[in-house]
Image: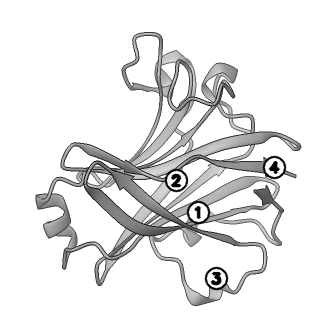
């Protein structure tokens, strides 16, 4: 998957938890249909991606959810929507140091985390990194959309940040946690121009 740069810088104010028809008409916005699966769960989804030379934009749009509102979704146990990066490029998600960004639907906040040696989530800020990801969620007619925006050149410590420099190949996984079960798509391998 080749991620070509788009025109214009993606701004924080553009992240509102919705992917509009105007955005989907952008020739630089890549839309990748996937299925998020986990155990008995399976839902169609679309992963949107774009980079503008400064930032990497990702949106996870999960459709056909059997819920009418965010409140129903939360009552069913949906806690976080996440995007993970294979920082160590070892083909495994997640292993020590791999970066994970999540939008907490309960707290309505973004978490920039990683796996330290004890394989527990830790904020990037614990080891000198920054919580530098912006995200927003929206829900409409059984469709949950979460948009993420993160800098291509982050100020995180090197071992906590994916290689988003030009010519890098990045393995990305996204999905959500529902009823304490991970539902996710297979890894996408993207190349940064």
Label 4: element kind: strand
Q: With 126 as the anchor, is 177 left or right in this view?
A: left
Which label's residue is closer to the chain start, 1 or 2? 1
Rounded to the nearest whole Å, what is the CA distance between mark 2 and mark 3?
A: 20 Å
Q: Are marks 2 and 4 in contact (CB under 8 Å)?
A: no
- Helix, strand or loop for disc 3: helix
Distance CA(mark 1)–CA(mark 2): 7 Å
Separation of residues labelled 2 and 4 (CA atoms): 20 Å
Kindly indicate the quadrant of the structure image that contains residue 121: top left
The location of residue 190, given as percent across then percent down, is 73, 50
Around disc 2, counting alpha carbons within 10 Å, would you say few (fewer than 14), some (14 to 19), or many (20 or more)?
many
Residue position for label 4: 192
Tag shown at residue 24? 3
N-terminal of the two: label 1 or label 3? 1
Q: Is residue 162 left or right of residue 121?
A: right
Of marks 2 and 4, which one's residue comes earlier in the chain?
A: 2
Q: Secondary structure at mark 2?
A: strand
Q: Position of residue 170 (x, y in %)?
A: 71, 41
Other-residue count near label 1 (Cα within 10 Å), few / some / many at <14 / 14–19 / ≥20 = some
The disc at residue 134 is 2
């Amino acid at each position: 998957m080749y991620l070509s740069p788009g025109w214009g810088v993606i701004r924080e104010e553009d992240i509102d938890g919705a992917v509009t028809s105007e955005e989907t008409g952008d020739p630089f916005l890549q839309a990748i249909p996937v299925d998020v699966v986990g155990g008995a769960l399976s839902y169609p989804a679309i992963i949107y991606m774009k980079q503008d030379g400064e930032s990497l934009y990702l949106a996870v749009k999960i459709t056909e959810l059997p819920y009418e509102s965010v409140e129903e979704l939360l009552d069913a146990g949906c806690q976080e929507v996440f995007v993970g990066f294979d920082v160590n490029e070892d083909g495994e998600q997640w292993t020590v140091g791999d970066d994970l960004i999540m939008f907490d639907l309960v707290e309505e906040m973004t978490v920039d985390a990683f796996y330290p040696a004890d394989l527990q989530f830790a904020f990037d800020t614990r080891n000198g990194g920054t919580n530098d990801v912006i995200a927003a969620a929206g829900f409409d007619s059984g469709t949950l959309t979460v948009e993420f925006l993160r800098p291509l050149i982050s100020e995180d410590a090197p071992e906590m940040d994916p290689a988003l420099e030009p010519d890098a190949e990045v393995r990305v996984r996204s999905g959500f946690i529902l009823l304490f079960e991970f539902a996710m798509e297979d890894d996408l391998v993207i190349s940064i121009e």
